[in-house]
């Protein structure tokens, strides 16, 4: 059975369209830490653990895996949780008019501030380089945003979908998601995302036409000091 490209979406992206952002060693590849914390590791065939991490020039990494992996000596699992991968498999009509304003490097401080409050998941200072970020401002303050992350063959990941708690319920998240998806489709690609199954946003994604594809374990590992 041939593996689906989305079974290793980080590895495929880093070996392809995002290779300029990749740090690689035998059996492991990851984004430059300034861009993203995600990586992909091939488990050791003898032990099933991730010994390849020892060659990685970084002290922490987040790995999406299909099942729980064994952590090698010298590393520790600092956080782990299951996520659901969902794909655009019938999202209906997009908004007829563009929504939100493009975000640039000048907006990064405001984006990091919003991420710290809304906590959509890992977001680094250079994540914006992966493209397609749009946001909403109220009285000059960034209150909602969305953008892109990994770009495996034929697909683009929607990421950093978040709204400040004081501004939820206004439809900003839905409209920004559709705006990012518009750009993804214009590039001839399909959109996907990952979400905690307990996250209320899962219902929004399903209502728009995203469908569950596969469950993953998301593990954050750190080198012991």
Image: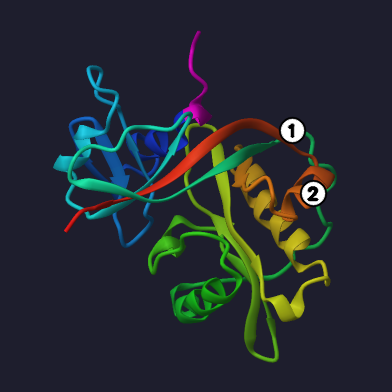
Coordinates of residue 35 in the picture (x, y in percent): 36, 59
- The relative height of residue 212 versus residue 23 in the rendered view (above or below) is above
* Residue name at image x 22 percent, y 40 percent: 53
Q: Could you say which is closer to the camera, residue 57 or residue 78?
A: 78
Mark 1, secondary structure of its residue: loop
* Residue linked to disc 1: 89
In what quadrant of the picture does the C terminus appear?
Answer: bottom left
* Residues at circles 1 and 2 in contact by the CB criterion of under 8 Å: no
| Neighbours of disc 2 within 10 Å: few (<14), some (14-19), many (20+) | few
Residue 64: say if magenta: no
Residue 3: say if magenta: yes
* Residue name at image x 51 percent, y 79 percent: 113
Q: Nearer the viewer, mark 1 or mark 2?
A: 2
Coordinates of residue 134 in the picture (x, y in percent): 62, 66
* Residue name at image x 32 percent, y 33 percent: 70
* Residue name at image x 66 percent, y 38 percent: 86
* Residue linked to disc 2: 203
Write the start and end of the magenta stretch as one range: 1-7
Coordinates of residue 32 in the picture (x, y in percent): 29, 54
- The residue positioned farthest toward the bottom in the image shown: 139
Q: Could you say which is closer to the camera, residue 8 or residue 53?
A: 53
């Amino acid at each position: 059975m041939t593996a689906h490209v989305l079974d290793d979406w980080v590895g495929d992206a880093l070996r392809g369209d995002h290779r300029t952002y990749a740090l690689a060693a035998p059996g492991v590849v990851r984004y430059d830490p300034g861009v993203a914390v995600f990586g992909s590791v091939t488990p050791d065939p003898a032990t099933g653990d991730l010994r390849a991490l020892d060659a990685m020039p970084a002290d922490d990494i987040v790995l999406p895996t299909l099942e729980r992996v064994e952590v090698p000596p010298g590393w520790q699992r600092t956080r782990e949780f299951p996520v659901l991968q969902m794909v655009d498999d019938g999202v209906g009509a997009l908004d007829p008019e563009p929504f939100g304003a493009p975000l640039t490097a000048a907006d990064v401080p405001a984006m990091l501030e919003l991420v710290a409050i809304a906590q959509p998941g890992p977001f680094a200072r250079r994540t914006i380089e992966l493209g397609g970020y749009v946001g909403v401002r109220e009285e000059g303050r960034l209150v909602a945003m969305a953008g892109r992350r990994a770009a495996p063959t034929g697909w683009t990941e929607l990421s950093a979908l978040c709204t400040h708690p004081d501004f939820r319920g206004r439809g900003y998240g839905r409209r920004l998601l559709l705006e990012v998806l518009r750009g993804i489709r214009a590039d001839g690609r399909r959109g996907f995302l990952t979400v905690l199954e307990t996250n209320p946003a899962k219902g929004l994604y399903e209502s728009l036409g995203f469908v569950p594809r596969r469950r993953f374990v998301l593990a954050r590992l750190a080198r012991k000091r």
